[in-house]
Amino acid sequence: MPRADDLPMFTVDHSCNTPCTHNPLGVKGCGEAGAIGSPPAVVNAVIDALQRAGHAHVTHIDMPLTPSRVWSAIQN
Amino acid sequence: MHNFDFVKPSSVSDAVKALSAEGAQALSGGQTLLPTMKQRLAAPAVLVSLTGIADTRGVCLDNGALSVGGATTHAAVASEARKYYPALADLAGGIGDPAVRSRGTIGGSLANNDPSACYPAAVLASGATIVTDRRKIAADDYFQGMFTTALQDGEIIIGVVFPIPEKAAYVKFNQPASRFALTGVYVAKYASGVRVAVTGASADGVFRWTEAEKTLSATFAASAIAGLSVPSDGMIADLHGSAAYRANLAKVLTGRGVAAAH
C-alpha cells in the first residue's frame, strides 16, 4: 500500500480549458477514472506472468494480490 | 487519553522507586504505549520515563561484546553500532520509519516483546544477555511468549550485551502498512555454532529454528537447508498471510540471511 512518502512531487493544475458542456459548473468527474481499468490489468498481468513461468493452473486470483495470495495460488 | 502524572528520574534507583507506586508504568520511547493510551486501552496513573537516565543510553564495547543501553534509540544503534556489529545496525535502521527510530528504544521493544518486533530476533539469535536493575537474563530464558517476558513487575532493562558473531544478517519481509516483520529471520554465525531466530511468524513470538541451526553449523550455506521445513503449527494466520505462508517465509528468509551474512 503506497504511503505519503512514496508519492513523487507534482503540480496541481487548476486551469479549465475545456469545460464540460453538460452541467452549469463545467465540471468533469475524473476521480475514479484510473481505478476502473487498472486493477484488472494488474491482475491479468500477474496471472499471465505466472502462466508463462509454468503455473498454467493459475487462472484466477482475488484482489488484493498480496504476496501471500500469489504464493497460495502457486501452491494449489 | 486519560489524565496521568509524569516523572522523569535521572537514576536507575529513583526509577525503581517511582515504579513501585500504585498504577505506575514505565515509559521508554512510547511507540506502543502512547498509542495504546490514546485509544484508552491503557490508563496508567503515573508514567515513569526511562529516557532521562544518562548511563542507559548509547553503545560501547565491553570485553569484546557490544553493550547497548536500554534507552538507546533505534536510530542511535543504526549509526553507533555499525562499526562493531553491522547486522545489528542494519536491523535497527530498518525498524518502522524515521520518526519511530528517533523515539523507539531497544529496552522498550524488548520489554513489550511484540511477536512481530525486530529486536527480539537479534537478541535471541545473538544469545545476548538482558541486564536489568536486579539481575542478568539470558535471551533463551527471557522471551516467554507473545507480549510476555521474564521481567518482573517494576523491573527495568538497563542494557543488552551482544556477543559479536563472525557473520550475521537480518532479513525481514515487511508488513507494508506497519513495517513490522510479516516474518523476519536473524542468522548469526559464531565459532561455537550458528543460531537462527524467527520473528513475526509464531503466535508464541520469537523462536529459534534449531533444526536449521544444527544443519548450518555443519555447513554454512543457503543450500544446506533445502531439505528442511518449518512446521506451520502455531504460526500466525491473518489478513496478510496464512500459517503455511509464514512457515515458508521463515525458511526462505533463513536462506537469504545465510547468503547475506557479513
Image (tube, coloured by chain):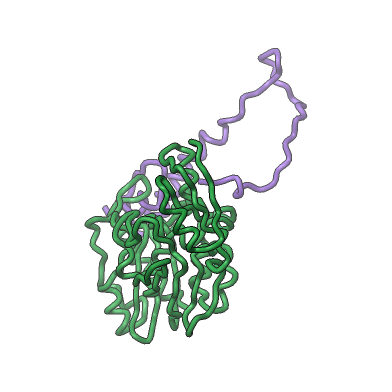
Chain colours: A purple, B green
* Residue B177 visible in the displayed image: no
Say which quarter of the image contains residue B214: bottom left
Residue B236 or residue B259, whichever sits in front? B236
Q: Position of residue B70 (x, y in %)?
A: 49, 65
Q: Could you tell whether B81 is left or right of B159 in the image?
A: right
Q: Is residue B5 above or below residue B54?
A: above
Q: Position of residue B169 (x, y in %)?
A: 45, 72
Of residues B95 and B77, which is closer to you in this image? B77
**Would residue B212 appear left or right of B117 to someone viewing this image?**
left
Q: Residue at x 40, y 55 (%)?
A: B112
Instruction: Decide: is B96 above or below B189.
Output: above
Quadrant of residue B258 in the image? bottom left
Q: Is A34 left or right of A49, judged from the image as shown? A: right
The residue drawn where x is 51% and y is 33% is A36
Question: Quick check: B179 left or right of A62?
Answer: right
Give residue B90's position: percent from left, percent from top.
52, 68
Whole-percent x, y for residue B153 in the image:
36, 55
**What is the residue that sits farthest to the top in this orientation?**
A24
Depth order, front residue of B228/A42: B228
